[in-house]
């Protein structure tokens, strides 16, 4: 199994600012994903972080709002830009190796509150 | 698009008793995987059990087992001998490619 370190674990931010969340894995992984979990709700996939190329975004999510970087096979960042209170959520990084029989492992999440 | 439905927003079980959480899904694919994840208040997503669609035998992991009905597209989780530490949000999830699609979740409360 992969050990995932996600930072920060929580933050309180002001409206209009940006926050970058880091995801570090202890081994090389093929796939890295970013999920959002709004209060009391399920997880929604934001995007797939692609190593060396632009992330693949799901419907309803755009690069200008959620820029993602993935410089190598063990690290990715998600930035929440120009934040509003509606962005208050838990953001989770998850990883897997290629192949649909592989389990997805999750980081411990970042609890974001926007005032 | 694949969808996952958990029709029970909340369930309660007495300690040491058995509880079943329901999940149905919709897909046109024949090869896929199904999962149950547990999310305690710590927010950590913990994989409970996994089922490959091509396997007829139901997966089991200690006190956790599934009832997989492929034709009915049903994938329920049975927790036997419930413990206080089982209290959490449980998510059913479908994976038909590289993406994982989650249900809305079921809150499980365990009474002592």
Image (tube, grey):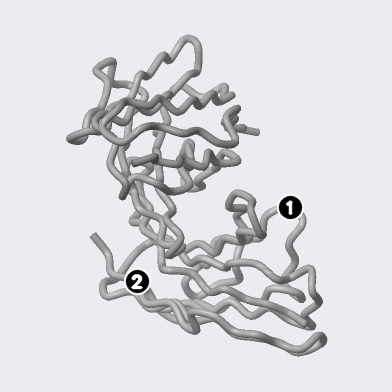
Element assignment for label 2: strand
User: Badge 1: how crowded within 10 Å, few (<14), some, or many (20+)?
Assistant: few
Instruction: Check the picture and name the quadrant holding the C terminus of chain B.
Output: top left
User: Badge 2: how crowded within 10 Å, few (<14), some, or many (20+)?
Assistant: many
The percent position of residue B24, horizontal first and vertical second, equals 54, 23
Element assignment for label 1: loop
Residue under pointer 1 = A59
Distance in Å between CA atoms under marks 1 and 2: 26 Å
Above or below, A114 relative to A91: below
* A56, A91: nearer the viewer: A91
Res. A102 in view: no
Q: Is residue B107 left or right of residue B38?
A: right
The quarter holding residue B35 reads top left
Write down the chain letter for disc 2. Answer: A
* A107, B54: nearer the viewer: A107
Q: Is residue A69 left or right of residue B15?
A: right
Q: Is residue A24 left or right of residue B105?
A: left
Write down the chain letter for disc 1. Answer: A
């Amino acid at each position: 199994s992969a050990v995932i370190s996600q930072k920060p674990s929580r933050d309180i931010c002001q409206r209009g600012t940006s926050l970058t969340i880091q995801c570090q894995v202890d081994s090389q992984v093929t796939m890295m994903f970013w999920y959002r979990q709004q209060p009391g709700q399920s997880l929604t996939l934001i995007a797939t972080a692609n190593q060396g190329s632009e992330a693949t975004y799901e419907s309803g999510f755009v690069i200008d709002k959620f820029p993602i970087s993935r410089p190598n096979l063990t690290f990715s960042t998600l930035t929440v830009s120009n934040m509003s209170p509606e962005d208050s959520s838990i953001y989770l990084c998850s990883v897997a190796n290629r192949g649909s029989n592989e389990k997805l492992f999750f980081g411990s999440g970042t609890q974001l509150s926007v005032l | 698009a694949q969808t996952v439905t958990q029709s029970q927003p909340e369930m309660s079980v007495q300690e040491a008793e058995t509880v079943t959480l329901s999940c149905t899904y919709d897909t046109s694919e024949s090869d896929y995987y199904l999962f149950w994840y547990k999310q305690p208040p710590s927010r950590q997503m913990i994989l409970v059990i996994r089922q490959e669609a091509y396997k007829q035998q139901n997966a089991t992991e200690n006190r956790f087992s599934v009832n997989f009905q492929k034709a009915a597209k049903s994938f329920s989780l049975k927790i036997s001998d419930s413990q206080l530490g089982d209290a959490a949000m449980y998510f059913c999830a479908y994976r038909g490619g590289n993406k994982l699609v989650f249900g809305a979740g079921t809150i499980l409360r365990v009474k002592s």
